[in-house]
Image (spheres, rainbow, N blue to C red):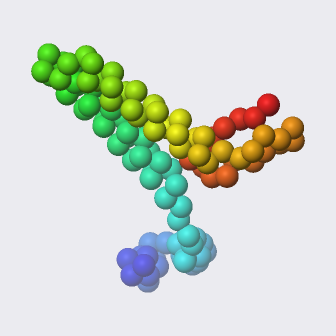
Amino acid sequence: MNFLKSFFEEDCISEDSFEKVKNMSGNTLFSLHWEIKTLLYLGVMLLSSGLGILIYKNIDTIGHQVILLIIAAISAGCFFYCFKNKKPFSKELVKSPNSFLIIFYS
């Protein structure tokens, strides 16, 4: 903010411009929503790419059955979490209890 004041004192900017910029750069909140979301997506993409390359290069030592077992275990864990945290059946609209459990009821 000191550089803005020095510009105003040297008559580089008008008083109107100085006040506008001073008011705009006040104590406003700044959302990091999109930055964090982008970093999360980038991290997931890099993790899945890295795991894919690791499995591709070591498929002969790991074995197909082990990879299928790992995929089945992850799927079973996801299904267990969903069934454990679901709400009971209702003919009315049932809201999701949290953002991790997304189940659509018809």
Residue under the point 27% across and 18% down:
65
Q: Quadrant of the C terminus?
A: top right
Most distant residue in the left direction: 61
List x then y, in percent, for residue 19.
58, 77
Could you tell me residue 83's position as x and y percent? 60, 40
Give the residue displayed 71% in from the left and 35% down from the top: 104
**75 and 47: which is toward the camera:** 75
Determine whether, in the image, residue 26 is placed left or right of residue 40.
right
Residue 55, picture quadrant:
top left
Image label count: 0
Horizontal side of residue 103 vs 8, given as left or right: right
Query: On the image, which quarter does residue 73 sit in?
Result: top left
Asked which quadrant contains residue 47, the reply is: top left
The percent coordinates of residue 12 (x first, y second) are 44, 72
Question: Who is closer to the viewer here, 91 or 36?
Answer: 91
Q: Residue furthest right?
A: 92
Say which of 8 and 87 sits in front. Answer: 87
Q: Residue at x 49, y 72 (%)?
A: 13
For this view, does 32 lie left or right of residue 20? Answer: left
Q: Quadrant of the N terminus?
A: bottom left
Please state which of residues 78 and 84 is positioned toward the viewer in this rendering. 84
Is residue 56 visible to the viewer in this orientation of the structure?
A: yes
Query: Residue drawn at (53%, 43%), measured in percent from left and top?
Result: 81
Confirm whether residue 10 shows in the render: no
- In this rendering, is residue 33 above or below 29? above
Could you tell whether 82 is left or right of 8 in the image?
right
Give residue 89's position: percent from left, percent from top: 78, 40
